[in-house]
Image (cartoon, grey):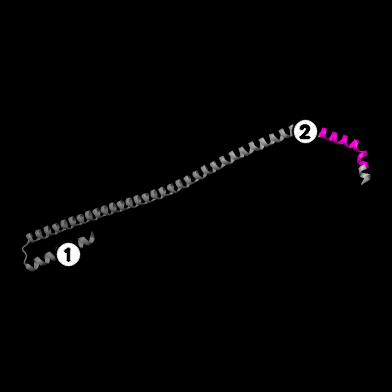
Amino acid sequence: MDAIVNFLIEQADSFYWAITVFVIFVLILIKAGVKPIVSALDAREAKIKTELEESEVAYSKAKDLQAQLDEQLRGAEAKISEMMAEARRDGETAKAALLEEGRVELEATRQRTMREIKGAHQAALVEVRKEMADIATLAASKIMSRELDTNAHQDLVFAAVEELAAQAEAN
């Protein structure tokens, strides 16, 4: 241990100078280097704080935008549902209108056909009456032109009816 103490005593002069230089160096370093380092750290801290605030603002805006888009999407879905329902209602209305139009047209066609049938029936009746009148006139003129007994009269009426039937079959 004496050797260490002797060594320190011999080197004490160098040791004090080394400590003095070290302290001066630290003081210069503190005086000259700490301020730029502290200001650089402060600037970096301010920059990080600003970026953090900006990111929080951007995040808030993104959340608001997402909420708006979600609301718009819900609105669009509701509008699509409403449009689909309206299209169904319009389709049902058009279907009902077409069915009603078809029913009206069918009824008009049925009535027109019934009128045509009735007209044809009336025309046939007129024709039959005309033929009967012609036959009756012919029979009456034949009866008038000759005096007939009962058998001849019956024969004449039967002949007129048969002639009428033959004419009706021909037409």
Indicate the quadrant containing the C terminus: top left, top right, bottom left or bottom right.
bottom left
Q: What is the distance, in whole Å, between disc 2 and disc 1 at their CAs? A: 151 Å
Mark 2 residue element: helix
In front of the other: 55 or 108: 55
**Element at badge 1?**
helix
Q: Where does label 1 land, which residue?
A: 162
Look at mark 2 in the image and give the residue it sits on. Answer: 30
Lower sequence index among marks 2 and 1: 2
Q: Which residue shows up at 61% across the image and 39% down it?
A: 55
* Residues packed near mark 2 inside 10 Å, few (<14), some (14 to 19) or many (20 plus): few
- Measured as percent of width and height from the top left, residue 110 is found at 27, 54
From the top left corner, tell me how far across and down residue 97 is, in percent. Answer: 34, 50
Amino acid type at mark 1: Glu
> Is residue 66 placed above or below 122 in the rendered structure?
above
Numbered range of the magenta stretch = 6-25
Q: Is residue 83 left or right of residue 35?
A: left
Rendering quarter of residue 155: bottom left
Residue 115 % position (x, y):
24, 53
Q: Main secondary structure of the magenta part?
A: helix
> Disc number at residue 68?
none
> 115 and 29: which one is in front?
29
